[in-house]
Amino acid sequence: MNYAERINDIKDAAAKMSTPVYQEKEGCKDITPRTDLQQNKSKLCTLEEAIRRSGLKDGMTISFHHHFRGGDKVVNLVVDKLAEMGFKDLHVAASSLQDVHKPLVEHIKNGVVTKISTSGLRGELANEISHGLMKEPVVFRSHGGRGSAIANGDLHIDVAFLGASSSDSSGNAAGYSRSQNAKSISGSLGYAKPDAQYADKVVILTDDLVPYPNTPNAISEHDVDFVVEVDSVGDSSKISSGAIRDTKNPRDILLAQQAAKVIVNSGYFRDGFSIQTGSGGASLAAVKYIREEMINRGIKASFALGGITAHMVKLHEEGLIERLIDVQSFDKVAAESIMRDPMHKGVSANEYASADEPGSATHFLDIVILSALEVDVNFNVNVLVGSDGIIRGAIGGHPDTAADSALSIIVCPLLRGRIPCIVDEVTTLITPGSTVDVVVTEYGIAVNPRRPEIAERLKAAGLTIVDINDLKERAKGIIGDAQPLPFGDKVVGIVMNRDGSVMDVIKNIVE
């Protein structure tokens, strides 16, 4: 068969097909456009349709992320719909829960939600659970611990409901949007990525449906089963509310200055160092003083890690930090930066802090500055349960970064009002003292006896080094002996270690 005969046979075969794939036009050959590829309409559906098609049943596990923090609208929207559809006995596995999730209280009372796994609880939901609302204890994991549990199957997710600032109809989703119709922006979707990768079914909810392909994306269409367009997935203005704050408090500024001096004289402040700061006011303020020393000494950081803020973006844009590794954007400036800057990288919770991944970023972390509700004389830290026994915080990446960093610094005042922060024993153990190196207070700096070389360097720099027991006694001398908390016998929370073992339990508070 010659070439001309072969072409004729191909044309004849194509002509018999129901959908032509070949057309010849005057002077050229052309392929018929496949407009159906522009929109994968098979994934587009309503929320109720997505729930029904997902195969969700009573007793299953659903998951959410918290990148919109206090502005999140997805959890309440989805659980309200599940309640309307008659679902019961569901396990809510959220990366964290906020004040805005108060409506879950009624869903727990009505039996729609009977289990919760999370990194943190706040507000009325936390208060009710602390008083014994749930029959089963809430399971608390760090961000890295949650990522590991999802990956190894300890936390199996049946259906993940993930809010995205933009998505195309195939499910290519991101925490930002380049369209003029953008309603929300969250930045990194690091805590949603493990859910998208490992959940049996994945539902993307978005308030900005964009043309295919949505690129670059944080979540790939290959991991997405359904796409639901809603009025709003979150209020971006509330991302930086609550625990994330700048400070003008003189005490916080003093703590920040002391923390910066610890870093500068620790032996780890050198060209190419890496750093993560917590969300507390003193931790964020410390960045200002570190910046001044970096400029004075001609030092640049290789990367900044974790929840990225405008402070870190500024240092990066000034050329003082080479890369930003972002698991959660803590404000609008950071969220917009990750959209436009290729050196600002969004990573999953596993890439951020999983103990099981040799390449996770925390393994390469030099310095971390963290806050605390309580520190005890053995350097153990509590960031979850308040001095009144009420759950009011989140584990976050606290134990992950403390364990993996070369230098972990805890910044906290000696007292908060009439409440001591340096105590004999923490109310709830979150971060083991074996992973904590330095505690900075306004009355001096305590160095873990496990790190005598750091103590010597700080003393040589003229910093005031004190025994942590002396700090505890000073607090006690001011306020006297604290009354024991009225804990009951019911376990309302279980704190998991990074390796999947139980770290501590939280008992109900009785008033």
Image: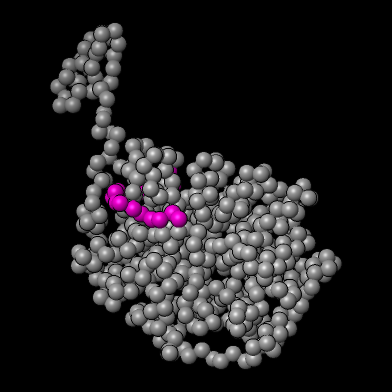
Would you identify the image quadrant in which residue 511 lies?
bottom left
Say which of 429 and 337 sits in front: 337
The image shows residue 503 at horizontal and vertical percentages of 52, 76
* Residue occupying the point 58% across, 65% down: 280
The image shows residue 472 at horizontal and vertical percentages of 68, 84
Q: Magenta stretch containing residue 225, yes or no?
A: yes
**Is 504 placed left or right of 297 in the picture?**
left
* Residue occupying the point 50% across, 46% down: 336
- Is residue 453 visible in the rendered structure shown here? no
**Is 60 placed left or right of 93 in the picture?**
left
Would you identify the image quadrant in which residue 155 lies?
bottom left
Q: Magenta stretch containing residue 128, yes or no?
A: no
Q: Is residue 214 above or below residue 359?
A: above
The magenta span reads 217-237
* Residue occupying the point 44% across, 46% down: 176
**Is 347 placed left or right of 262 in the picture?**
left
**Is 35 placed left or right of 69 in the picture?**
left
Say which of 328 and 364 sits in front: 328
The image shows residue 369 at horizontal and vertical percentages of 64, 64
Which part of the image, by quadrant, shows the N terminus? top left
Say which of 433 and 229 sits in front: 229
Would you identify the image quadrant in which residue 156 lies?
bottom left
- Colouring style: one colour
The image shows residue 409 at horizontal and vertical percentages of 67, 67
